[in-house]
Image (cartoon, helix red, strand yellow):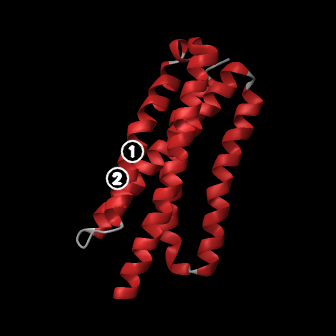
């Protein structure tokens, strides 16, 4: 049991580091858009909303992962909360970039970007399931949630750009 707790704590610290890195990317994308073409955010409420919402969602994920690294109680709740906040924040980041690509470049490049971002977790999940068949339900739920966020809040709005 103690070994499992150590693995959970190490995993939480690793995920915390990834979240901090992604938070830096969020601020960079946001700053870049404001500095180079603020009109993109004015013209596209969905981009502005998702990019703006991604920052506090990522912060919530960071706090949950940090709490998980030392929590003695409610580990599953902290894990689930951190995961949900991360998927929403990451999905919003991907969507913001994909919709911006559709707006500034073209829809084909945007759809290619979305396709890559859907295929990557599916391939990762396939490999994880090959290692441990008990992970199939978890991976379907996680990937399904992510893909729904990408399709509903990313691909469909991007298709309406042109």
How far across and down, in percent of the image, does residue 83 sit?
Answer: 42, 56
Q: CA distance from mark 2 to mark 1?
A: 6 Å
Q: Which residue is mark 2?
A: 63
Q: Are marks 2 and 1 in contact (CB under 8 Å)?
A: yes
Q: Residue at x 65, y 47 (%)?
A: 117
Q: Which residue is mark 1?
A: 59
Who is closer to the viewer here, 123 or 16? 16
Q: Residue at x 43, y 65 (%)?
A: 12
Placement of 136 over or under 100, stated as above or below: below
Who is closer to the viewer here, 121 or 64? 64
Q: Residue furthest left?
A: 73
Q: Quadrant of the C terminus?
A: top right
Q: What count of labels does the image hold?
A: 2
How far across and down, in percent of the image, does residue 2 sit?
Answer: 34, 87
Placement of 142 over or under 135, stated as above or below: above
Placement of 32 over or under 138, stated as above or below: above
How far across and down, in percent of the image, does residue 129 sit?
Answer: 59, 74
Q: Residue at x 64, y 49 (%)?
A: 118
Element at label 1: helix
């Amino acid at each position: 049991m103690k070994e499992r707790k150590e693995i959970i704590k190490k995993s939480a610290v690793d995920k915390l580091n990834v979240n901090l890195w992604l938070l830096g990317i969020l601020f960079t994308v946001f700053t870049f858009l404001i500095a180079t073409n603020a009109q993109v955010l004015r013209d596209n409420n969905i981009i502005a909303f998702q990019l703006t919402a991604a920052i506090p969602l990522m912060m919530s994920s960071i706090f949950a992962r940090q709490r998980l690294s030392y929590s003695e109680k409610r580990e599953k709740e902290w894990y689930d909360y951190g995961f949900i906040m991360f998927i929403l924040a990451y999905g919003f980041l991907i969507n913001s970039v994909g919709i911006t690509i559709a707006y500034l470049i073209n829809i084909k490049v945007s759809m290619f970007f979305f396709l890559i971002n859907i295929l990557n977790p599916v391939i990762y999940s396939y490999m994880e399931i090959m290692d441990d068949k008990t992970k199939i339900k978890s991976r379907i739920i996680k990937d399904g949630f992510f893909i729904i966020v990408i399709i509903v809040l990313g691909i469909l709005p991007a298709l309406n750009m042109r």
